[in-house]
Image (cartoon, rainbow, N blue to C red):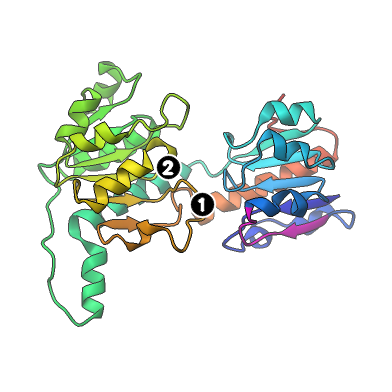
Amino acid sequence: MKIAILDDYHDVARRYADWTSLGGDAEVQIFNNFIPDEQVEATLEPFDVIVAMRERTPFPAERIRALPKLRLLITTGMRNNAIDMPACTAQGIVVCGAPGSADANTATAELAWAHILGLFKHLPAEDAAMRRGMWQTAMPEPLAGKRLGVLGLGKLGAAVAKVGQAFGMDVVAWSPNLTDERAEAAGVKRVDKHELFATSDVVSLHLILSDRSRHVVDAAALAAMKPTAYLVNTSRAGLVDNEALMDALVKFRIAGAGLDVYPEEPLSPTDSVRDLDNVILTPHLGYVSRENFEAFYQNSLEAVKAFQAGKPIRVLNA
């Protein structure tokens, strides 16, 4: 059995799970670097099992059909919109989930707040200035009394809102299905979409990407924002009209942004967003933690063993 473990950028798959326990019949190959899109099919064609790291490498129908030997596709996490489930079923491929740690959402909420604090306190600019021998070049902004707009009040959004309340912020929320009762239970006020964007000092995105939510942050939403406001996206790049966002940032129609997700990942070394001084960039770290990755790889190994035994577990395309 040939097993491919994809996109192990941190080189931790062997450290966090004992793949040798599969026995001598299992040949495990770990890919530490991103496989270019045009090379994926040829590279993965020999493998019987693929372990995919979240949505880093997509598996649309045409790619599935180009992998005739594939019998088991494991995704870290229990949902992966980048895998065409019906195509896998049609090819006789079993798709299994490998859940992360119970507190995985905490890492994303923490990162969102790292971005918010970095933007309000101008930490990247001050750090860079200090390294150039300078002193106090930017004016930090207080959080207390400012308005935090949370787009999506699920577990992540509610966690972000709770921290905002602790900082003394006025927290409002909106999502297509949010009710006054749910907002009140989280201690926040429900407002409509336009009011959220027009009145918030920082907007943090926590919606699931779907056809309905794609580009929910469009040119009109960005135009409604105050010129002193920030946008933070640790969720999915597709929630935002990237062209409209870049235009707003380049022309300083909003004060800045904190971005952890991008239309194409890994982000190109020459992408123009890297040149913007009013943006904090992180390389999709929202779900990255030692505890989460240990659970990912150990649960992936468990799924391979269950498949070997003829009893697949956590099947997502049953």
User: On the image, which quarter does residue 234 sit in?
Assistant: top left
* Disc number for residue 265: 1
Mark 1, Cα crowd under 10 Å, few <14 / some 14-19 / many 20+, is some
Q: Nearer the viewer, residue 225 or 96?
A: 225
What residue lies at 57% left-to-right and 52% top-to-bottom?
293
What is the secondary structure assignment of the residue under circle 2?
A: helix
Q: Please state if 205 lies on the left or on the right of 59 as rendered.
A: left
- What type is the residue that disc 1 sits on? Glu
**Whether label 2 touches label 1, CB < 8 Å:** yes
Q: Amino acid at mark 2?
A: Ala
User: Mark on residue 237?
Assistant: 2
State the residue at coordinates (36%, 56%): 273
29 in the magenta segment? yes
Q: Is residue 123 above or below residue 229?
A: below
For the record, the magenta segment spans 27-36
Q: State the separation of the CA atoms marked 2 and 1.
A: 10 Å
